[in-house]
Each structure stands twice: as structure tokens, then as C-alpha cells.
Image: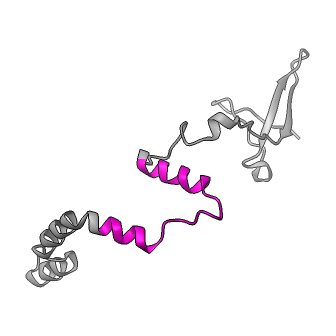
Amino acid sequence: MLKEVGASGQISLGKKYAGQLFDMQFLQDGTVQLTPVKVVPVVQEELAAYSAGDGGLTPERLAQRKAAAARTPAQPEPGPQATKEWAESHAAEIEQYNAWASQREPYSQRVRRWREQGV
């Protein structure tokens, strides 16, 4: 089969090979050899942790994940009591947010009002 290299320096092998990786070797006689390969990345244990790419997670969330991973079946995840304690310790902030939210018109109602006004 004859393939022509285009102006951009590329050749098309066809849809059958789409997405596959090839090892390209240039031999001394000018031959270009393409060999299909499968690549398996090597992962080092130190780099596999969230430190390299934490996905934008906050330090607090990373700490929660680390604590969850370290828990044994004998140490269950904090339950409703911990949630209740958190809510009680943040009661002032929750009340402040609820007061702020009660003064705001819900977005769905604003949209309805805008449509009625022809905005």
C-alpha cells in the first residue's frame, strides 16, 4: 500500500488505527518502521498521593480523605452526633446565613417575574 506524506508531514493510517500508539523507528536504510505498542505508566508510591495533583481540593478535604483512609472497620465514620455537634458549634453562622437568605427572592421567582415583565 502506498501512502503520501502531506504538506504538514503527516500520513493517515485509517480509522482502524485511530487512537493507537506506535513506536516509530528510523532505520539506517531510510525505512520508517511503525510498531503498535501499549504503554503502561510507572507510578511511584510517593507521587501517587494527592500532593502532586490534589484536584483543587482544600487542605481540610485532603485531611478528611486521609483520615477516612486510615480508619479501620472498628473506627466507624463520625455519625449523627458529630453532625449535631458541628451544627451546634456553628449555630451563629447558620442563623446569619438563614437571615440573609430569607431576605433574598429565590432565583426561580425572579425569572418568573422577569418573564411576566417582558425583561
> Is residue 58 among what the camera can see?
no
* Residue 48, x across and y down, in percent: 64, 40
Name the residue at 80% across, 53% down. Answer: 16
Location of residue 27 with respect to 100 vertically, above or below: above
User: Any magenta on residue 74?
Assistant: yes
For this rendering, which residue is in front, 116 or 97? 97
In the rendered image, residue 88, in percent from the top left (x then y), is placed at 28, 68
Query: Above or below — where is 37 with respect to 7?
Result: below
Q: Which residues are magenta?
A: 60-87
* Location of the N terminus (image quadrant): top right
* Residue that extends furthest to the right in the rendered view of this protein: 29
Horizontal arrangement in the rendering, residue 6 relative to residue 1 (left or right):
left
Say if the magenta span includes residue 97. no
Q: Nearer the viewer, residue 6 or 89?
A: 89
- What is the chief secondary structure element of the magenta stretch? helix
Compare residues 22 and 68 and report the one nearer the observer: 68
| Residue 49, x across and y down, in percent | 60, 41
**Quadrant housing residue 107:** bottom left
Q: Is residue 4 visible?
A: yes
Identify the residue at image location x=82%, y=42%.
38
Indicate left or right for 26 with 93 as reference.
right
Task: Please indicate whether residue 21 sits to the left or right of residue 56 in the image.
Answer: right
Q: Residue at x 34, y 65 (%)?
A: 86
Residue furthest to the bottom in view is 116
**Residue 12 appears left or right of 52:** right
Against 119, residue 12 (above or below) is: above
Q: Position of residue 3 (x, y in %)?
A: 80, 37
